Amino acid sequence: MLDHHIQKSIVYDLAFAESLRFSDLKPDDMENKAFTYHLKKVMKAGLVQKLDDGRYTLTMKGRRVGKGALKKESRLLDRAYSILLLAVRNIEDDAWLLYKRQTQPLLGLKGFMQAQPVAETDARSTAQKTCFEETGLTVDFQVHGHGYFRVYRAGELESFIHFTLLLGQNPTGKLLETAESAGYFWQQTPNFESPDMLPNIRTLHKMCASEPGQFVEATFEL
């Protein structure tokens, strides 16, 4: 689908922005004609589109590839992306640890921390390690539920994940303020209905308040 490293870098760069100009995407040492060839290739593949103001943005298909574009083999677009969703709560003041997404899909929306499952490590250990490395917080996580989420925007699939929800309460430590922790913040009694939240967070919040062991499959439209 992406035959050249320039084509991969176009999709990757656009995963971190709503849109970019031609000059933002083109490497400084590359001629316009050569770069235009690769830009047209990713547009023909249905991953990138040109906006009316002349800037470029990812299509819904492109958002699903996102920063995975630099991997040796792109993820199959019709296959659910496996993820651990980490809900961290301080019970005393009902503060939840939230994260503002820095990349597509769903750039800029707020939700729970994410971690990548690791073949050699169980989910709880992966969650604890990821949380500590990214935020400085120590949390004892428990697996709380799992399922599938689909998110459509204007009728097109933007995100499809298979998730495992882990809940951790009363963490110890202080939230770091580093580049790695950028985007994380505490919010007391958050409004999970707010439009700046990920659409799945309302469902996840309800799962956290219920008994462990739930399976949920839900579809959302933005």
Image (cartoon, rainbow, N blue to C red):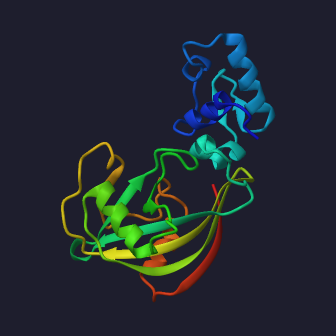
- Image location (x, y in percent) of residue 74: 68, 48
Residue 186, can we see it?
A: no
Q: Quadrant of the C terminus?
A: bottom right
Q: Quadrant of the N terminus?
A: top right
Could you say which quadrant of the image residue 82 lies in? bottom right
On screen, 32 above or below 170? above
- Image location (x, y in percent) of residue 23: 57, 16
In the image: residue 43, left or right of residue 113: right
In the image: residue 90, left or right of residue 183: left
Who's the residue at 47% across and 67% down the image? 85
On screen, 92 above or below 56? below
Who's the residue at 47% across and 57% down the image? 197
Residue most extreme to the left: 173
In the image: residue 36, left or right of residue 11: right
Q: Nearer the viewer, residue 67 or 119?
A: 119
Q: Nearer the viewer, residue 30 or 18?
A: 30
Who's the residue at 67% across and 63% down the image? 80
Residue 75, can we see it?
A: yes
In the image: residue 51, left or right of residue 112: right
- Image location (x, y in percent) of residue 144: 46, 81
Who's the residue at 34% across and 75% down the image? 168
